[in-house]
Image (cartoon, helix red, strand yellow):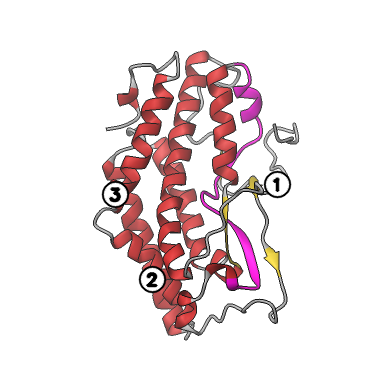
């Protein structure tokens, strides 16, 4: 288990782990990989909020110290864990990311000199969740899953990580708090549709801003994210990926076995 400060209510230094030596590094064109990245970011977001909802509801049923908790009680709206690292290299060995060049999306994803470990989820775990979860096997396993979801990353050019991808980070923080606390079923096609529509709008606004500034490379990257959201099967892809996970997690819990409909429709 990754170590954390035990001082409750304060933020911890980000816990970092190296990437697995067998981890896949995606090397297709940047635009193509950004479209896939958009879908995987949505998958990670919903895996996170569903798992968090199951954990909190279980802790509330168990009556652990401090319960009952609201759904977002243990959500940190920033990355607290990180698997993998970025790299900085000479521009003579790799290409620089040219913000003004719309053709940047046609270059291989691994060809850039300044790369960040960009989080899929960019949501973290507040101090105290580990202690609350360790007394029950189900919540302990869910906590380990949440750490992985919080820490998973993909190598992307730094300009994207602090540019269009940052817009999704902000959206994830807002949506997680809203969806975990609004009293509705945590996962549904309507939830995924809302995610898709708000992400599409946020990246659309960002693309317009970059066009006005002449930063056509950043605008083109945002447009490739939006291509994923414009896909008529985006909601179906996310739903098919996350739905079985909810069923499996609920069925593996003695507290919610046969009660999956509390979490999905």
Residue for point 45% across, 63% down: 34
Residue for point 32% across, 48% down: 237
Mark 3 residue element: helix
Distance from Cα at disc 3 to Cα at disc 1? 32 Å
Residue nearer the viewer, 55 or 153: 153
Residue 134 x %, y %: 63, 21
Q: Earlier in the sequence, mark 2 or mark 1?
A: 1
Which residue is denoted by mark 2 in the rendering? 223
Q: Which residues are magenta?
A: 111-135
Mark 1 residue element: strand
Which residue is denoted by mark 1 in the rendering? 16
Q: Quadrant of the N terminus?
A: top right
- Find residue 58 and name its label: none
Q: Earlier in the sequence, mark 3 or mark 1?
A: 1
Mark 1 burial class by Cα count in 10 Å: few <14, some 14-19, many 20+: some
Which residue is denoted by mark 3 in the rendering? 235
Q: Residue furthest left?
A: 232
**Is residue 237 rendered magenta in the image?**
no
Mark 3 burial class by Cα count in 10 Å: few <14, some 14-19, many 20+: many
Q: Do callouts 3 and 1 mark residues in contact (Cβ within 8 Å)?
A: no
Mark 2 residue element: helix
Distance from Cα at disc 3 to Cα at disc 2? 18 Å
Q: Is residue 33 visible?
A: yes
Distance from Cα at disc 2 to Cα at disc 1? 31 Å
Residue 247 x %, y %: 36, 27
């Amino acid at each position: 288990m990754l170590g954390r400060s035990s001082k409750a209510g304060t933020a911890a230094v980000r816990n970092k782990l190296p990437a697995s030596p067998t981890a896949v590094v995606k090397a297709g064109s940047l635009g193509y990989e950004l479209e896939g990245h958009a879908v995987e970011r949505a998958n990670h977001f919903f895996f996170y909020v569903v798992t968090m909802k199951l954990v909190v509801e279980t802790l509330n049923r168990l009556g652990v110290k401090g319960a009952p908790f609201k759904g977002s009680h243990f959500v940190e709206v920033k990355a607290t864990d990180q698997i993998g690292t970025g790299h900085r290299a000479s521009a003579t060995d790799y290409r620089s990311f040219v913000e003004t060049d719309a053709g940047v999306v046609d270059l291989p994803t691994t060809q850039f000199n300044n790369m960040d470990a960009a989080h899929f989820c960019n949501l973290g775990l507040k101090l105290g969740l580990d202690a609350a979860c360790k007394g029950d096997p189900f919540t302990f396993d869910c906590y380990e899953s949440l750490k992985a979801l919080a820490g998973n990353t993909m190598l992307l050019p730094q300009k994207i990580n602090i540019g269009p991808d940052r817009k999704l980070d902000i959206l994830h923080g807002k949506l997680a708090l809203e969806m975990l606390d609004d009293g509705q079923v945590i996962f549904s096609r309507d939830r995924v549709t809302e995610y898709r529509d708000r992400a599409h709008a946020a990246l659309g606004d960002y693309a317009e801003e970059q066009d006005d500034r002449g930063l056509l490379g950043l605008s083109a990257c945002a447009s490739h994210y939006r291509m994923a959201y414009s896909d008529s099967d985006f909601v179906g892809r996310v739903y098919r990926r996350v739905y079985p996970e909810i069923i499996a997690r609920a069925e593996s819990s003695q507290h919610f076995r046969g009660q999956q409909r509390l979490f999905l429709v």
